């Protein structure tokens, strides 16, 4: 893998795995000891088995729909066997007839480590900002 | 700086700067081109001037109170001139008489780069998870 665009390639592989709802391909992007700060519901999640369960549940919940993930504002750095990247991801649900249904965005930060010749995500942090007054998540990007 | 505990030292310096509300000491932890995904209000924030303004506004809003920041579950990795760390931070407001007022927690991920012999934070991502039903932020850690 060309390390100059490592992060973009990982985002593309992530997007491919989500679009075709391939739990194995999704799981293969992550390290056994993945530590996730996920946007939804739980403070932290550790280990590939738990993360695989999340993906399996997410993909099966989609029914006939699929999700297209696109990215903006990608930035990354690599040194030796460690890489860090961040971006804004937009998830758009697509109906079986191709109609775009709802979409939402989040911020993502990923840390990757190269082990045995392959890069794996060791840490992922996704979130949306929170409105100070209402304490509600701001799920659509509008301020930058 | 001993790189084996680089991240813990950065968290300690962050906590010290916040406790004494020292905008200069706070700002000195960050790179000129800092890119922040902050928990509150905005999707992203870039550049040290904007981040300094945030700190100045935060510290001056505290009046006679101060904020003590503690960390849990710290994890980090260093390779060459790049480091990544993540943790859970708890911010506790303390009244002038020492009484603990409200506290809240968030998840933090930091990326650091060594430039000219000193480590600076180049990316910071803070967040709380969001409840799927209500879309409200979960501001107190209880599930792990």
Image (cartoon, coloured by chain):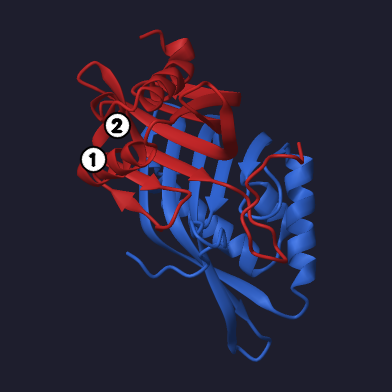
Chain colours: A blue, B red
For this view, does B115 lie left or right of residue A25?
Answer: left
Q: Position of residue A32 (x, y in %)?
A: 70, 35
> At 61% across and 77% down in the image, what residue appears?
A93
Q: Whole-Å distance between the Cαs marked 1 and 2?
A: 7 Å
Q: Residues within 10 Å of mark 1 (few under 14, many from 20)?
A: some
Marks 1 & 2, CB-CB < 8 Å contact: yes
The residue pinned by badge 1 equals B48
Relative to A64, residue B59 above or below: above
- The residue closer to the viewer here, B6 or B89, is B89
Q: Position of residue A51 (x, y in %)?
A: 73, 46
For this view, does B39 lie left or right of residue B29?
Answer: right
Residue B100, image quadrant: top right
Task: Tell me the SS state at disc 1.
Answer: helix
**Residue A131 shows in the view:** yes
Residue B101, image quadrant: top right
Q: Position of residue B99 (x, y in %)?
A: 57, 25
> At 23% across and 27% down in the image, what residue appears?
B24
For this view, does A76 lie left or right of residue A95?
Answer: left
Looking at this rendering, what residue extends furthest in the front direction?
B97
Mark 1 or 2, nearer chain start: 2
**Residue A117 shows in the view:** no
Quadrant the C terminus of chain A occupies: bottom left
Relative to B43, residue B76 above or below: above
- The residue closer to the viewer here, B126 or B80, is B126
Quadrant the N terminus of chain A occupies: top left
The residue pinned by badge 2 equals B30
Q: Position of residue A6 (x, y in %)?
A: 43, 45
Relative to B98, residue A97 above or below: below
Task: Tell me the SS state at disc 2.
Answer: strand
> At 62% across and 69% down in the image, what residue appears?
A19
Q: Residue B131 — which label? A: none
Output the chain of dot 2.
Answer: B
């Amino acid at each position: 893998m060309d390390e100059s665009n490592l992060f973009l390639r990982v985002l593309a592989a992530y997007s491919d795995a989500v679009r075709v709802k391939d739990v194995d391909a999704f799981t293969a992007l992550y390290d056994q000891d993945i530590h996730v700060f996920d946007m939804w519901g739980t403070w932290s999640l550790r280990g590939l088995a738990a993360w695989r369960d999340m993906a399996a549940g997410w993909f099966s919940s989609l029914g006939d729909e699929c999700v297209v993930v696109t990215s903006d504002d990608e930035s990354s750095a690599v040194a030796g066997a460690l890489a860090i990247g961040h971006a804004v991801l937009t998830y758009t649900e697509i109906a079986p007839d191709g109609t775009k249904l709802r979409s939402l965005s989040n911020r993502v930060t990923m840390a990757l480590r190269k082990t045995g010749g392959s890069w794996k995500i060791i840490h992922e942090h996704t979130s949306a900002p929170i409105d100070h007054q209402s304490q509600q998540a701001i799920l659509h990007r509008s301020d930058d």
